Image (cartoon, rainbow, N blue to C red):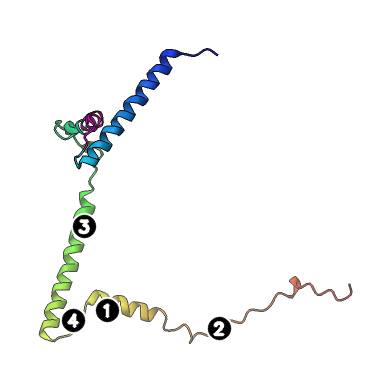
Amino acid sequence: WDNDWDKINKQREEIQHIKEKQRLAKLAKEAGEEFVDEEAQEKLEKSHNQWVDTHEKKVKASKADTSKWDNDWDKINKQREEIQHIKEKQRLAKLAKEAGEEFVDEEAQEKLEKSHNQWVDTHEKKVKASKADTSKWDNDWDK
């Protein structure tokens, strides 16, 4: 047995120190006082003060890389015109509704008529009967 007596004595002192703290805390509690452990309080304050300056530091502003911005102004202006056109239609529809009139959007009406006319003749056409390809049938009854 190779005992490290320095280490053992150090641990014994730590244990005695902890027991002394517990004894003082118990006495303070019995007396109705609040026991404040100085070491624990120091550790607590140290941990609280560790992050104090984070927001006080000056933040470095980074510049945006404008070389990656490739704006297609033709496309943007076209979309703006479409938005203005839609808003104008909505405004006219609102005015017509307030006046008690029925608002008819010409573009929407054209699309509606086109789609109705597209499917008008589907059932009127004579269906072409397709003949079955009997050569592909496998009905060899002699097997």
* Mark in front: 1 vs 2: 1
Which residue sits at x=40%, y=17%? 9
Q: Mark 2 points at which residue?
A: 127
Nearest to the eye among marks 2 and 3: give it: 3
Secondary structure, mark 2, is: loop
Distance, label 4 to label 1, CA atoms, is 11 Å
Task: Identify which amino acid the numbered label 2 is placed on.
Answer: Val
State the CA–CA distance, disc 2 to disc 3: 46 Å
Q: Which mark is residue 109?
A: 1
> Real-space Cα distance between discs 1 and 3?
23 Å
Dot 3 or dot 4: first in sequence order is 3
Residue at 30% from the left image edge and 33% from the top image edge: 22
Residue visible at 18% across and 61% down in the picture: 81
- Kindly state the secondary structure of the residue where label 3 is placed: helix
Disc with the residue nearer the chain's start (1 vs 2): 1
37 part of magenta stretch: yes
- 130 shown above or below 66: below
Residue 47 falls in image quadrant: top left
User: In 3D space, how far apart are the residues under numbered discs 2 and 4 (Cα atoms)?
Assistant: 41 Å
- Residue 130 visible? The answer is yes
Between circles 3 and 4, the one closer to the viewer is: 4
Disc 3 from disc 4: Cα separation = 25 Å
What amino acid is found at the position of numbered circle 1 in the picture? Gln
